[in-house]
Image (cartoon, grey):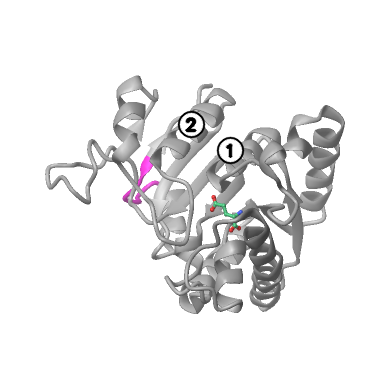
Amino acid sequence: MRIVVKVGTSTLAHQTGQLNIRHMEELCKVLADIKNAGDEVILVSSGAIGMGMGKLHLRERPKTLPEKQAAAAVGQCELMYTYDKLFSEYNHTVAQILLTGSDVRDEHRRTNFINTMERLLELSTLPVINENDTVATDEIVIGDNDTLAAIVAVHCHADLLILLSDIDGLYTANPRTDPDATLIPVVTEVTYEMMASAGGNGSGSAIGTGGMQTKLTAAVNVMNAGCDMVIANGKNPSILYDILEGGAVCTRFVGKR
Ligand code: GLU
């Protein structure tokens, strides 16, 4: 199987923007093990801006473009340094790919990206992808990593996209405010009602971006490409084993075949 795993800032960093060491160690260990078992793994990782915040001692997520770009430039180094170190412990080689919207919209550049990804996977590396936040201005921005992860899953013909978030999956209502909200385990069609109620339903943290609506849009795109998508809680990365074995608390969106 070719699996794309997306982790959000809320999984990788504390509210302070400092690295969540326990989560990151656990995540790298599980992903290394999944790769050892024979699956191909592509990691889409947020955290550049969040970790830049921590390193630069900024109290809140940067708001202006130059400040975001500066924070991302600092944080991306910290992120890749940490992945390289942790995956090396399990004998895996990481590769960094930073994309902007124009890299995937332009056919020629998209083909280059796809070819490079194929070669990296043949070479058995573990590609780690993020948006190139340092140069992505308004005109060329992808904007959030749920969308980026869906683009990667579709173009790399993945079998499964897993979005690790700070919520267990898609609920019938907002579980933070509605005690009657229940988790929807399987979705075969993203409906208009789901989209409408996702506006106020779902994840959202002080240091990350994204939310349930971007996740549902990602689901529509990957399902149309015949790929499954899972939303699960990343607070315990060993949930990845349960997802692959089919026993996790999560929402699975079934791709069209
Ligand atoms: N690319 C951003 C970062 O690394 C994150 C975007 C997102 O989480 O959606 O900080």
For disc 1, does the CB lie below 8 Å from ligand 1? no
- Residue 185 visible at all: no
Mark 2 neighbour class, 10 Å CA radius: few under 14, some 14 to 19, many 20 or more: some
* Whole-percent x, y for residue 71 in the image: 64, 66
Q: Main secondary structure of the magenta part?
A: loop
Q: Are marks 2 and 1 in contact (CB under 8 Å)?
A: yes
Residue drawn at point x = 46 percent, y = 39 percent: 215
Q: Find disc 2 in the rendering and name its residue.
A: 217
Image-based side of 83 in relation to 125, left or right: left
Q: Find disc 1 in the rendering and name its residue.
A: 150
> Image height check: is 82 above or below 223?
below
Q: Which residues are magenta?
A: 245-251
Residue nearest the observer in this picture, 57 or 40:
57
* Whole-percent x, y for residue 68 in the image: 62, 59
Which quadrant does the N terminus fall into?
top right
Q: CA distance from mark 2 to mark 1?
A: 9 Å
User: Image quarter for residue 233?
Assistant: bottom left
* Whole-percent x, y for residue 70 in the image: 69, 65
Residue nearest the observer in this picture, 114 or 201:
201
Q: Classify the position of ligand 1 by quadrant: top left, top right, bottom left or bottom right.
A: bottom right
Residue type at mark 2: give it. Answer: Thr
Q: Helix, strand or loop at disc 1?
A: helix
Mark 1 neighbour class, 10 Å CA radius: few under 14, some 14 to 19, many 20 or more: many
* Whole-percent x, y for residue 87 in the image: 66, 71
Residue drawn at point x = 30 percent, y = 41 percent: 201
Residue type at mark 1: give it. Answer: Ala
Front of the two marks 2 and 1: 2
Whether the magenta-drawn stretch holds residue 73 is answered as: no
- Residue 34 visible at all: yes
